[in-house]
Amino acid sequence: MNIALCHYRVGETDGVSLEMDKWKKVLENMGHKVYFIAGSTGTSDGYVIPEMHYRFKEDLKIERNAYLKLEDYQDEDELIRAIRKQAFKIEKALKKILIENKIDLIIPNNILSIGRSIPTAMAFTNVIKELGIRCIGHHHDFYWERKSFSHPTCNFVHKALEEYYPPKDDLISHVVINSIVQKELKARRNLDSVVIPNVFDFDEKLWNVDDYNKDFREKLDIKDNDILMLQATRVTNRKAIELAIDVVGEMQKKENRKILEKAVLYNGQSFKGDSRIILVLAGMVETADDYVERLKIRAKESNVELLFVNNLVEHSRCVKNNDKIYSLWDTYVFADIITYPSIQEGWGNQFLEGLFAKKPMLVFEYDVYKENIKEKGFKVISLGDKHELDKYGLAKVSEGVIKRAAGECIKLLIDKDYRKKMVEENFRLGSEFLSLESLEKKLKSIV
């Protein structure tokens, strides 16, 4: 079959883009021809419909007026006209691509679930019905999980959420990424769905130091005996990066640094008085408020060094403005511990990446982790499963939890055998339960 995988963007380091790469690989191994259709293609090849881009100016204006405040249009009718005008442009371009490439199956990712870009959801639904084309809606996130898409400003937007997210049609079947939203989709919309969790290719070549990436630490001015704590996700509020800052702040305390200085690190390095513990943030910044500034204040108060490096990191290795750009995978090679303190995730791509990279992980036990992942037996540095928001709107867990997590991090930095046993067992469990082979079995049953 000719299959189109569609999203607002591909070829980037966000979770949906990365998951689409895996689906493409598996579907092609099954003998299908696969195309990408998106608002931007990053470092991948595909068809671009500019109006679908997640930062397209008119689309952002519509989104702001649909969910925040109806102020840039005279009234609801003018907003409706703007939505339909935008949808028509997308429909026209989408139809052309589907017809020219004789697409048999279309797989929109989040387009028919998350609530953003009403014109895109409307266009896809209309084209699917007009062409009579089979569709599998791959739903990573739903609008009711996001505060920003849960407060329509007018009746039309309210109806659009009911009609398009996701649509009810015999041509459209539904895939979700965890059992929690499977139950929720059934309760809210009486729609059946198949759970296909995020996966990883555990058979690919392990990420290692090579001629291309060997200067990564040097480029960031991080010494071999510094400790690199890696936050590889996007920088956005629900990732709760402040919890990682709290743990690193605890590790920085004099008594904990002394433990590190007296021991030899797992990699043979000696942590010294001038060695640093650095929280490196590799993902793109995607926040509508002052979250990054609040993180910087929290870091300064906790004596934590933050290093934002997304300008040097892309989906794949490349050269940009004459600068060498590293892949997201290169950042994992040089990490000592992965921080993954998200308080909300549809599944957890960074968790999978950490398993494959054979790195210890600091994890807040978000709902899907507890429901679908923890039961498989993975060992992590736990931040527990309860959090509050402080007066600045930042997540916090108890001081005892932070102290325990920091102690566990230190143990994993100095106890080589303990560390090796943990990461090897996690890799084995990942290979067993969350591999491309498990994805292929699932896809064979629905494609």
Image (cartoon, rainbow, N blue to C red):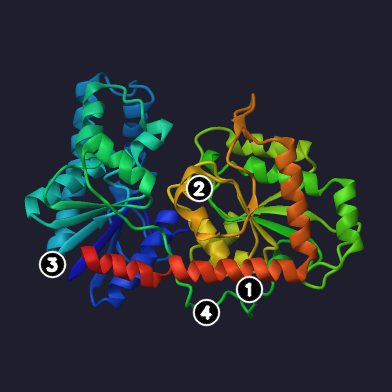
Q: Nearer the viewer, mark 3 or mark 2?
A: 2
Tell me the SS state at disc 4.
loop
**Which residue is pictured at 77% across the width and 36% down the height?**
301
Residue type (three-letter) at the residue carrying disc 4:
Lys
Contact between labelled residues 3 and 4, with CB atoms less than 8 Å apart: no
Q: Position of residue 394 (x, y in %)?
A: 62, 33
**Which residue is pictured at 41% across the width and 32% down the height?**
148
As measured in the structure, the alpha-carbon distance from the residue carrying label 4 to the one carrying label 2 is 30 Å
The mark nearer the N terminus, 3 or 2, is: 3
Contact between labelled residues 1 and 2, with CB atoms less than 8 Å apart: no
Q: Which residue is mark 3?
A: 102
Residue type (three-letter) at the residue carrying disc 1:
Asn
Contact between labelled residues 2 and 4, with CB atoms less than 8 Å apart: no
Q: Is residue 148 above or below residue 87?
A: above
Mark number, residue 213? 1
Residue type (three-letter) at the residue carrying disc 2:
Lys
Task: Give the quadrant of residue 417.
Answer: bottom right
Q: Which residue is mark 2?
A: 370
Q: Position of residue 340 (x, y in %)?
A: 59, 51
Residue 305 makes an appearance in the image = no
Q: Which residue is mark 4?
A: 205
Tell me the SS state at disc 2.
helix
Tell me the SS state at disc 3.
loop
> Which class describes the residues within 10 Å of circle 1: few (<14), some (14-19), or many (20+)?
many
As measured in the structure, the alpha-carbon distance from the residue carrying label 1 to the one carrying label 4 is 15 Å
